[in-house]
Amino acid sequence: MPDRSRRTQLRETTSQAHASLDNMVGSFDSPDTYRHYLRGISAFREAVEDKLASAVWPGHGDNWDVEMFSGLIAEDLRDLNVAPQPPVNAPDMELSRESLLGMLYVLEGSALGARVLYKRAQSLGFDADFGARHLAVQSRRSDRWPAFLAMLENADAIDMEQVANASRATFATAEQAFRQASP
């Protein structure tokens, strides 16, 4: 029987953290719940993106282009006249190859969810020009997730427990941001 893919390992070991975050994000079915979402995602992305901005990409990830959405989220907040909240603390970890892969697992995976979230935002009247810029941009790229998975699967000699720990810490950071954004 073949070994499980690294993606499968991560999905299994982070499923609780992922489900918990999904519950916190909710379905945002009103402008108010969408504003809450924006406040939470802003506090999360700003913290994580600041940490990743100083990363040195070891090994196979040295040419990975991390998409930064904090600026677009800030514009979305301004559109809706919502004051941003301070960023939460970024996950406390060294930026090793494993931790970078773990963080990217969460960030790149969120683009899949962005497609669904963008449709919800559009139903509330927000779009690529007003209020949902970050979701519009994030949901456009369909090539990033397969490229990330290829990088993950092809990375030489990585400690998958460290990758999973970094993913769980990144999910926990997002949860903290959404908890902080709660009314």
Image: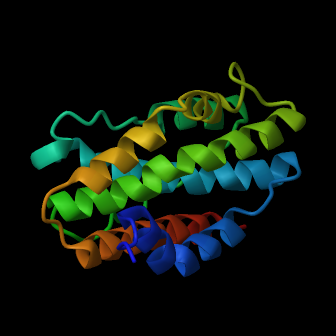
In the rendered image, is residue 54 in sight? Answer: no
Q: Residue at x 35, y 58 (%)?
A: 103
- In the visual, does 179 lie left or right of 12? right
Render colour scheme: rainbow
Where is 75 relative to 23, above or below? Answer: above
Q: Residue at x 15, y 39 (%)?
A: 62
Residue 140 rendering spot, x and y as whole percentages: 59, 27
- In the visual, does 133 lie left or right of 120? left
- In the visual, does 53 lie left or right of 118? left
Q: Residue 92's quadrant in the figure?
A: bottom left
Q: Residue 168's quadrant in the figure?
A: bottom left
Where is 19 relative to 35, above or below? Answer: below
Residue 14 rendering spot, x and y as whole percentages: 48, 75
Residue 62 or residue 51, whichever sits in front? 62
Residue 126 rendering spot, x and y as whole percentages: 79, 31
Residue 166 rendering spot, x and y as whole percentages: 31, 70
Name the quarter where the C terminus is drawn.
bottom right
Where is 7 relative to 39, above or below? Answer: below
- In the visual, does 120 lie left or right of 143? right
**View extreme (top): residue:** 129
In the rendered image, is residue 8 in sight? Answer: yes
Residue 42 or residue 96, whichever sits in front? 96
Residue 91 or residue 163, whichever sits in front? 163
Where is 142 relative to 84, above or below? Answer: above
Q: Residue at x 61, y 34 (%)?
A: 139
Count of numbered circles on the image: 0
Q: Residue at x 57, y 70 (%)?
A: 18
Name the quarter where the N terminus is drawn.
bottom left
